Image (cartoon, grey):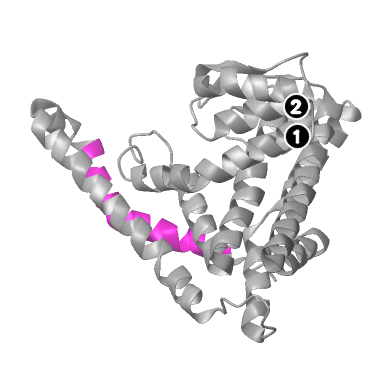
Amino acid sequence: MISITLFLGVLIDWFIGEPKRWHPLIGFGLLAQRVERLFNGKTLYSCEHNATAFMVDISVEKVSGIKLKTLGVLAVVLLCLPLPLLLYYLLPHSWEAISLLSVFNVALLYLAIGHRSLWDHIQPIADALICQDDARARHHTSMIVSRDPEALNIEVSAIESVLENGSDAVFGAIFWFVVAGGAGALFYRFVNTLDAMWGYRTERYCHFGWAAAKLDDVLNYLPARFTALSYAVLSNCSDALICWKKQAAAHASPNGGPVIASGAGGLGVLLGGPTRYHGVWHDKPILGKGKAPQANDIKRAMRLVSHSLMLWICVVSSAELLWSLL
């Protein structure tokens, strides 16, 4: 049954945590680096060191962008499709069957979700703030966000990371696990990993990373909105829904906006505001309602993610039971 497999995968993740060595996704990331250097490195090198040639003829610059996007699409297909497709056809589609292959589904879900890992990264931040150790809190926060460490708002950055990574690292993987089993969860995490590596609007990745970023947006569209709804149901529902409706569109991410706006509104905190990335200030929209977040609000955000995970397991179990009775 899907619900049993889901429960076992979540349970193993919580008690064991992510593998400390030989994590398959780390190996996938190293492979992705080699593919990116092979497909994107030489082309980008010529762009960086012969920039004047591209400035003279606009049509050449356009062709270069199309070429890089095409190479990006090819890289995503080669990295993300073969293994999940093979597993989809090998793993059993009958969830009642007890076999080594169905147990493999549990293992794939365990490797795909990061609930315990999220706690392990966020808990030290809250603990350091409660102990008034700003330097340690800032260090731990800089490990999970790409903002400049010396300029970041620790509480805001940590809560935004909790809410958004709850959607990406937990609920997105679970959604695609329910849809397509362990192969679906693995495919989702492959794409999510490539987006984290290539989905930046920099000179190096603005074209090559386009396919990974867009595919990640597509795969997260429904999971992000289900996550935002879960945050609303388990917190201040009316404020969460109002913030989601009125504020989400202002966020740069089509999926991060609903998740962060709903979570911030439900928790009664204000997120966003001026943020510095690589020395450049960005005026991010204010999301949420209420007060500036404190250290205890970080733990409240983590509990919201954990309670939402329990809700998802209950919903999947209930839906499966109802389906069996029909």
- Say which residue label 2 marks: 237
- Residue 202 lies, with reference to residue 46, above or below; the image says above
> Which residue in the structure is indicated by mark 1?
233
- Amino acid type indicated by mark 2: Cys
Check contact, mark 1 vs mark 2: CB within 8 A: yes
Residue 314: in magenta span: no
Image quadrant holding the N terminus, namely: bottom right
Residue found at the very far right of the displayed protein: 131
Q: Is residue 241 above or below residue 92?
A: above
The boundaries of the magenta stretch are 25-48
In the figure, residue 143 lies in which quadrant?
top right
Is residue 30 inside the magenta stretch? yes
Task: Considering the whole magenta stretch, tell me its main secondary structure.
Answer: helix
Q: Residue at x 76, y 67 (%)?
A: 8
Which x, y percent locates residue 238?
A: 73, 22
Q: Label 2, secondary structure: give it.
A: helix
Answer yes or no: is residue 218 visible.
yes
Q: Nearer the viewer, residue 171 or 164?
A: 171
Q: Is residue 107 above or below residue 233?
A: below
Residue at the (67%, 71%) spot, across then down: 107
Q: Residues within 10 Å of mark 2 (few under 14, many from 20)?
A: some
